[in-house]
Amino acid sequence: MNTVATAHNAKKPTGTLYLVPAPLDFGCAEVMALDASMPRATLEIAAEISHWICENAKSTRAYLKRVGETYPLCQPIQAMQLQELPREVHKKGDHGGGFDARHLLQPAVDGQNMGLVSEAGMPAVADPGSSVVRAAHDLGIDVVPLVGPVSLLLALAASGLNGQSFAFVGYVPAAPAERAQKIRELESLALKTGQTQIFIETPYRNTALLQTLLQSLQHNTRLATASGLTLSRAQCHSDVVKNWKSKPWALDNSVPTVFSIGR
């Protein structure tokens, strides 16, 4: 047997794509210590990755700087390879399968471990990144999700709503009439099936969305909110709409909030 030829023809092992969660304090005035919400094992792996696919290179560098303050990075941040997802992925999302991300994974094909990161929480969950995960599977690259905060599940757990059947429906429309119509449609589905409906909004619209919810939902529909999750001022509220109207609960327009409705 020609061992030299065999070694030359041997397939080079691929790297691993790690799905690296980020803390939920992105864009918030309050910044928590990373180890308050991020497991040590996740941060240690992140510190060893030099090739990244991200939403935004600037925010990723800031995150890696925080990681490096706790665990030494494998190389200076300036020397790392950071590839941003295209603008159209940010605007339209990549959950429908229209974007081919295989070219972004060439370092993993060449044997380098890579990290996929979003600006907050778990990449590819309520954030772009699913196209990268699909491409990794198609290329035979191992995909390893790391442990970290996922706002949707934290909010669901704190809501008192059905955790056996639930759906995340993304953003509701910004236009008032369309928003009210969408809310009524989601409520009808939740009351008919028992399936919890979870959605989010840009923080500065938190108060406006809450007002629409209280005006549009039936009195006995349960509404839950979870704001500033993992922060020291986190607040979770859950009650039927008729009781919401008599309580002094308000939402902060500067922190992310997850909304849930059900029965």
Image (cartoon, rainbow, N blue to C red):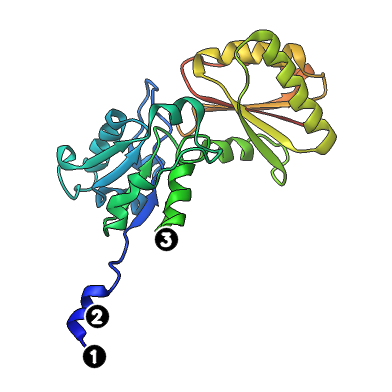
Query: Total marks drawn?
Result: 3
Contact flag, marks 1 and 2 (Cβ < 8 Å): yes
Answer above or below: position of 253 versus 152: above
**Among numbered discs 1 and 2, the one appearing first in the sequence:** 1
| Residue positioned 67% across, 15% down in the render | 179
Dot 2: element: helix
Foreground mark, 2 or 3, reads 2
Quadrant in which residue 201 is drawn: top right
Which of the image's four quarters has the N terminus? Answer: bottom left
Left or right: 220 as drawn, with respect to 54: right
Q: Amino acid at mark 2?
A: Thr
| Residue positioned 75% across, 31% down in the render | 262
Q: Residues within 10 Å of mark 1 (few under 14, many from 20)?
A: few
Residue that mark 2 sits on: 6
Q: CA distance from mark 2 to mark 3?
A: 21 Å
Quadrant in which residue 34 is drawn: top left
**Among numbered discs 2 and 3, the one appearing first in the sequence:** 2
Residue that mark 3 sits on: 140
Q: Residues within 10 Å of mark 3 (few under 14, many from 20)?
A: few
Residue 72 in view (yes/no): yes
- As drawn, the label of residue 1 is 1
Q: Amino acid at mark 3?
A: Gly
